[in-house]
Amino acid sequence: MITELLAKVENEWLDDLIQARIRIRPPLYGLKIGDLSSMNRKINLLVFNHREKQPALILRIAHTEEQKAFLKNEYAALSDLAKHAALSNAIPLPLGLHEHRNLLVAVEKSLAGVSLFALLLRKKHTSPSWVQRDFRQACDFLCELERTTLVGSLPFYDAADMDCKLEQLDSSYGPIGWPRGYRERILGIANEYKSLTLRQCGRHGDFWSGNLLMSPRGIGVIDWEGYAHPFGLFHDIFFFLTTYALFYPWQGWNKCSTESAFKLGFIEENWLSEMIKDTLILFFQRWEIPPRAIYLLLTLFLIEMSLPSAIENDPRYPPQYAKWFGLFQTFIQGKSLLLAPFK
Amino acid sequence: MNAIVSGYSQADLRFFLPLMPGQRVGVLSESKPLVATLTADGLDVALIAPPATNDSGSRVVGILRDRSDDFSRSAKRATAPALAGGAREVATTKPFREAPIVDLDHLIIPEYSSDCYDFYLSRILQRLKPGGWLLLGIHNFEALYHFLSKKRPVGQSHISLRKSSALLYRNGLGVVRCFGAYDELEHPEILVPLDTGEAAYFFFRNIFVPPTRFAAWTRPAAALLASIGLQRLLFRGLVIIAQRPSGGNDDH
């Protein structure tokens, strides 16, 4: 089947590619990559021209109805976002969506770069200067995404919304032993900032270091299947920073538990937790959201990720929401340096 | 590695063959997801059981046969254990003496390991129809990993790409493509084409995540070896795609 798809690229789909100024030089070679965490697997095929060291295309192949729906969503999102010049170089350019037998194949231009996740696991980009640079690039991209997809604002979460979320957690995980005064504090902050508004814009949906390709030319963002529009502003930045803290090589080549990594990133005092805090404050400063309100949004993000309904159609095995609930518990029980200035 | 995940990785291998609904595919694998997905794709799956060995482990004493054989159409079929996707496996200790039936449109062997590599594989390959495709995963005898690692894999027989190609040629098949499986044949998450070194070079430059400090040190060397055309030495598992020409079955 993969040989047939490569033949289609060389012949049947060639005109579209030439129009998009993609050079095809047969014989083509396909490098298959997959998602180890996923049971409901789609296939990604990097297509190389003959004697070229960078892939020219990526074929994303869906074979179940659920995958096809995700892939169509991605293709529509990329087609829309590619119209904006500021984003077009940082996203995979959509080149065609084709049916082949019972498969749906999206043809996209391949982006250059190495994923930030791979760099971290190679112990690269781990010094403060690199981390600051990578954070800035990620935030700049999110700001650009917000600017180009902004549709309006919604009222901030009030005490009733927060109370409802806490109730949902209680009903999902049984009675939760909340720290003393925690519930009152959260509801108090929500009341304090209920006059704020929250911008509604596009959300990538899976904005983690594995989907960010770093290259000397800048950042590239892949895997847009979870794109949603409009959506609250904060999801992507929190998802990026929390998962970054989890995958950062805190102990070099030794493994660091998820809970310890989260503590080091958001609870304990070190240069990276300071940088994460500063990045959040700087990111939300543009929209005049003060630090205490950021704390509320981070809490809300962790609650939403902890609910079984949080990640719709999560294909990973096992589902991730229980892991997020562990992080939420760590967050509310720790005495966070990150939260100190918010008090 | 999670068994479910590894099974699903092997199931992806079906995309490397031009399978059509209604065709008969022989599968020598314990991967239930592979069998289930093939069946779901409308293929007629014939399970082929691995070779049995005697106590010395050196000689095949019985080859298990699938439901396509005359023997398996006997009463034993009714009592055979049901497997994923509706396929059935029929076991027998009866030695395989009669001439094999040419009944398979395609053959998938994700991970082949046997002390009697030539003999057993030749017998299976004879069942492949003219024009049929083979996917064969082998543990790479030439992989540098075996020379550098202190770990010695147990229960795996290692075969070189050259020897496998020669064996396939003798059985009337031609190698069409070859891929390096990362990180192992049990869960071939990434398949890197080895026809030229560029894709392997890209893999080690851009995708490879070193699991150990040693792997991180050797990564630049691996990229260098790929750039000079020695990419076949860099993968523990190889996946060979071969085809029997439409013209003949026994041209060896």
Image (cartoon, coloured by chain):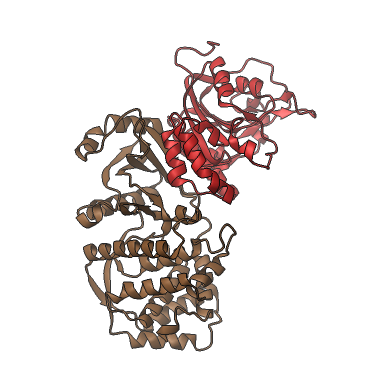
Q: Position of residue A113 (x, y in %)?
A: 37, 49
Answer with left or right where residue B117 lies relative to residue A69.
Answer: right
Q: Report x, y in % for residue A16.
A: 22, 37
Furthest residue in direction top, as rendered = B251
Classify B23 as above or below A308: above
| A5 sits left or right of A177 in the view | left
Question: Would residue A1 be seen by someone viewing this image from the given angle?
Answer: no
Question: Looking at the image, which is closer to me, A147 or A74?
Answer: A147
> In this structure image, what is the colour of chain B?
red
**Res B221 seen here:** yes
| Residue B202 percent location from the top left of the image | 42, 40
Q: In the rendered image of this protein, which colour is used for chain A? A: brown
> In the rendered image of this protein, does residue B30 appear above or below residue A128?
above
| Count of numbered circles on the image | 0
Given residues B123 and B73, the one toward you in this image is: B123
**Which image quadrant is residue A294 in?**
bottom left
Residue at 42% in and 36% down: B199
The image shows residue B62, relative to residue A232, as above or below, that is: above
Relative depth, front residue between A153 and B209: B209
Most distant residue in the right direction: B55
Q: Is residue A333 above or below residue B123?
A: below
Q: Is residue A212 left or right of residue A126?
A: left
Q: Position of residue A257 (x, y in %)?
A: 58, 64
Q: Which of the image's four quarters has the C terminus of chain B?
A: top right
